[in-house]
Amino acid sequence: MKTSAILLSLLAITALLLSACGGTKSPAAGGKLPVLATTSIVADVVRQVGGDYVQVTTLLPLGTDPHTFQPRPQDAAAIADAALVFANGAGLEEFLQPLLESAGATDKLVEVSQGIDLLPFEGEEGEGEHHHEGGDPHTWMDPNNVMVWTDNIAAALSAADPAHADAYRAHAAAYREQLRALDEWIRAQVAPIPVEQRLFVSDHATWGYFAEEYGFRQVGTITGSFSSAASPSAQELAALEEKIRAWGVKVILVGVEVNPNLAQQVAQDTGARIVRVYHGSLTPADGPAATYLDFMRYNVTAIVDALK
Ligand SMILES: [Zn+2]
């Protein structure tokens, strides 16, 4: 895309200017290790592990869809100020690699999903032209994967700030316990739903890890892709509606950041019900999904209530 190329040149110039101006390491951090996180979900987990020793800045504004985020000039400055850049990885942040390269900061990248076995795309016949290459980037939809994040974050923070390595390991262990409790809570919530009712369609292929871990089936998706940005053809939508009828799917999960128009059309045609869920962002502090733990509790409750 030409506009992206122009934007990246501007970002590169901004980054050069910033480093030419002395490149001071975040004076606002007050002795804390200044780090950047792409999504608010990654930022929350980095805060849990970093505690008081880390100053976490979040790149994507709350409510942003990470699949369609376009970097802004100030993002190069945020990268220049950070000692580490924590990203989900697994192909989620398509904007990030060029941004890091233009800022000369590829060595700052820590992909928290490193080491997780990524799920392939399922539920469609053959290889559609708009399927993502690689695996499912939505690793956070299973708290067991976020335990892996926690270990990756503790290792990266310890390497960057060895003086506080013991604290990072202790915070990570404490947060892992909370994730383990969340996992048990999810199992208890879904247990009463008969297996044959554990079916849904999603706006895009968001729920693969959740489905695999907790015995659900993501029967199909509106976009036919791991990304919310893909556009299905009329034929693909018709095939999806056919599937919804054949499987008796009652629920279409639609992320709050995502345009619901196509899902509404499919719901109208099939009688399935739209359930809004959180997808790639937390809410502000006074919202129902202000932390990752609350995000999962909200979503699981919404799914379980819809399928009961
Ligand atoms: Zn997504």
Image (cartoon, grey):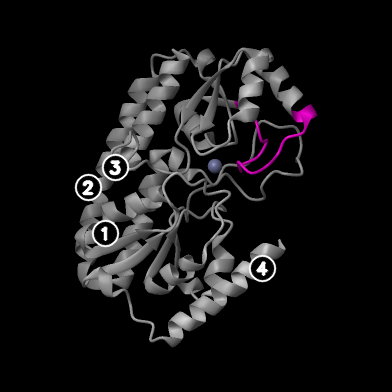
Check whether the beta carbons of the residues at disc 4 and disc 3 lie within 8 A of each other: no
**Badge 1 residue CB within 8 Å of ligand 1:** no
Q: Position of residue 202 (x, y in %)?
A: 57, 29
What is the magenta segment's predominant secondary structure?
Answer: loop
Give the extent of the magenta segment.
219-236
Check whether the beta carbons of the residues at disc 2 and disc 4 lie within 8 A of each other: no
Q: Circle 4 sits on which residue?
A: 5
Check whether the beta carbons of the residues at disc 3 and disc 1 lie within 8 A of each other: no
Residue at x 36%, y 53% (from the top left corner)? 43
Residue 126, above or below 87: above
In the foreground, 77 or 147:
77
Q: Nearer the viewer, mark 1 or mark 4?
A: 4
Would residue 175 appear left or right of 58 to someone viewing this image?
A: left
Q: Position of residue 306 (x, y in %)?
A: 46, 17
Q: Secondary structure at mark 2?
A: helix
Separation (CA) of disc 2 from disc 3:
22 Å
